[in-house]
Image (spheres, helix red, strand yellow):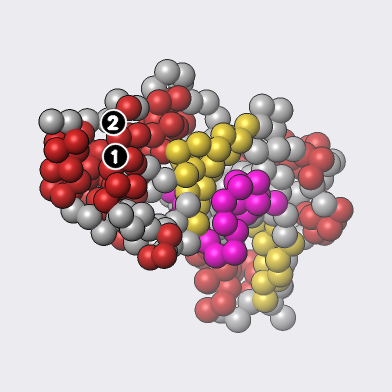
Amino acid sequence: MAGKLYVVGTPIGNLSDMTMRAVETLKTVDFICAEDTRVTAKLLNHFEIKKSLISYHKHNASQSGKNIIDRLMSGESCAVVTDAGMPCISDPGEDLVKLCAENGIETVVVPLASAAVSALAISGLSTSRFTFEGFLSTTKKQRLEHLSSLVNETRTMIFYEAPHKLIYTLKDMLEFFGDRKISICRELTKLHEEVIRTTLSGAIEKYELISPKGEFVLVIEGKPKENEVIDNIENAVIQVNELISKGVRAAEACKQIAKITSFSKSELYSEILNKNL
């Protein structure tokens, strides 16, 4: 009889969040596969868990995955963990679960905190419908295609981002989405946890002055529905002028507001020129 794969969530920053069930599961399985065995070893040592660790990440998933499946088919049980949070979400563990499904191996989830849902809960934005978009590609073409596909997304959007790419991501988002509300959640559950509720332009202004540190979850409001869109030229111009007052060039400001109104960039630009005559 084949063994079971346990998908075990681990704390996203605060070890006190670890559940009794997660600890017991890690103690009882035959072996544990981890994204980074060094990180997981620290977690196991903290809870005095002594188990064999196998490295399983995107660079060795093909070969390591086959070995894990062979062991599961022979009757052993295994827990898959990631460095923090729920494995298999924007994580190579996803492929391991697929392999188990293909081979008729039972999978059991032992849930814990998810950075995406935790950030959404404290974002102050709509939580009724949302879409998790994970990390944007480091390849410019794929990155811009991804953002372009979301321009008309009305659900709240959740992204992960690393500190060294944050400012570039915010600028790309402003270009595609216009100046929407954003909740920036940094170092969730850790000592220096921080939640900043602002706009995309406000976030850019902030991080052009200070260097981002830590891991980020970005929660961005979706595109306003038709009945929420600015429906007259006067209000649209007010929005354009607000961007201009923040240092955005007039042409760029008109372009951004055109994306969230029924007015074209040229209509808005013409209106701005007429009011300044």
Q: Which residue is mark 1?
A: 240
Q: Position of residue 33 (x, y in %)?
A: 63, 53
- Who's the residue at 38% across and 48% down the image? 136
Q: Are marks 1 and 2 in contact (CB under 8 Å)?
A: yes
Query: Label 1 crowding class (10 Å Cα cut-off): few <14, some 14-19, many 20+?
Result: many
Q: Does the image show residue 268?
A: yes
- Who's the residue at 28% across and 31% down the image? 244
Query: Label 2 crowding class (10 Å Cα cut-off): few <14, some 14-19, many 20+?
Result: some
- Who's the residue at 45% across and 38% down the image? 199
The kind of secondary structure element at disc 2 is helix
Q: Position of residue 9 (x, y in %)?
A: 69, 54
Which mark, residue 135? none
Q: Position of residue 14 (x, y in %)?
A: 74, 38
Q: Does the image show residue 139?
A: no
Is residue 91 one of those drawn in magenta?
Answer: no
* Number of marks present in the image shown: 2
User: Amino acid under label 2?
Assistant: Ile
User: Amino acid under label 1?
Assistant: Val
Is residue 114 one of those drawn in magenta?
Answer: yes
Q: Position of residue 119 (x, y in %)?
A: 61, 47
Tell me the quadrant of the picture where the N terminus can be found.
bottom right
Q: Which residues are magenta?
A: 113-135
- Which of the 4 image quadrants contains residue 6? bottom right
Which mark, residue 244? 2
Q: 55 and 15: which one is in front?
A: 15
